[in-house]
Amino acid sequence: MKPAAFKYHRPASLDEALALLDQLGPQARLLSGGQSLGPMLNLRLARPEHVIDLNDLTEFAYVRESGDAVEVGGLTRHYQLADSVYVRQHCPLLTQAAMTIGHYAIRQRGTLGGSLANADPVAQLALVAVALDARITLARQGSRREIAANDFFQAAMTTALKPQELLLSVRFPKFKTGEVSAYRMFNRRHGDFAVVAVAATLAVEDGQVQRLRLALSGIAPVPQRVDSVTRQFEGRRPDAQWAMDVAAAVAEAVQPEEDERVSASYRRELAHSLSLSTLTRTLEKLEGVGA
């Protein structure tokens, strides 16, 4: 199919893009990588009157240091996150997840801002943003605001973005020295979205868990951190039994949604097995850093 008719705009600056958004509001859709919007237009699931193409705003495709965080521009492509030595050094979970996104062509075009704004419940970068307590900067004409990733994602395909706003950048906290991470997902075919995915980070001090962050997607309409579970396993020695105990507690705590394709019980089993696999991988990495 072909898209329904729309008016195409290609702003040359951020100010021009924000002015268009302020003028057109809900009648406009933003285009960055086009990996989600393109198919929706072609299938006529989206019928905007205006499409605003952001691809000339190349200055917002960046990765840079921002104090204790790695700041990533909204137009940064997935492949840049997967290939960046700086990201791998300071925020390796972001690299690990980006490497699993779709296929090569998708990673070449898809953007961080587009992925987060689309808010697919099992998208890799949304899960990482929630897992790491990322801070998202939103811009509109004349103002900017910052919002926590956990507050940004409100429901499946629904965010806190207002019609006059665009996603400008995201700040991911830097990892502590010796902190390790792992990402695991289950999908039926290579390149598909996950059925369930798990992201975890682990920091150890004096042989005991100082901080454990674990988040899941595919369990609820938005990615979920399970802090109420992980807190009780901090202060303990991280070993194989510890990993099994955490995974069992996670599986008991989550409340997967039921649908006609995947049962809730199967999602719970995946939450258990993927949590165990993810934590086991973090333990292997701890040995590598000598923690």
Image (cartoon, grey):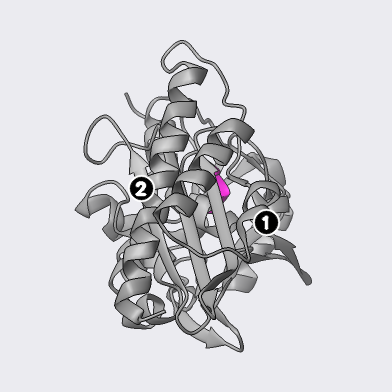
105 shown above or below 282: above
The answer to whether residue 84 is left or right of residue 70 is left
The disc label shown at residue 231, or none? 1
Identity of the residue drawn at 70% across and 48% down: 228
- The reply to whether the magenta stretch includes residue 222 is no
| Residue type, numbered disc 1 | Arg
233 shown above or below 146: above
The image shows residue 256 at horizontal and vertical percentages of 57, 26
Q: Quadrant of the N terminus?
A: top left
Q: Is residue 161 visible?
A: no
* Start-end of magenta stretch: 116-120
Tag 1 near tag 2, CB within 8 Å: no
Q: Secondary structure at mark 1?
A: helix
Q: Nearer the viewer, residue 117 or 197?
A: 197
Mark 1 crowd level (few <14, some 14–19, many ≥20, 10 Å Cα): some
The disc label shown at residue 277, or none? 2
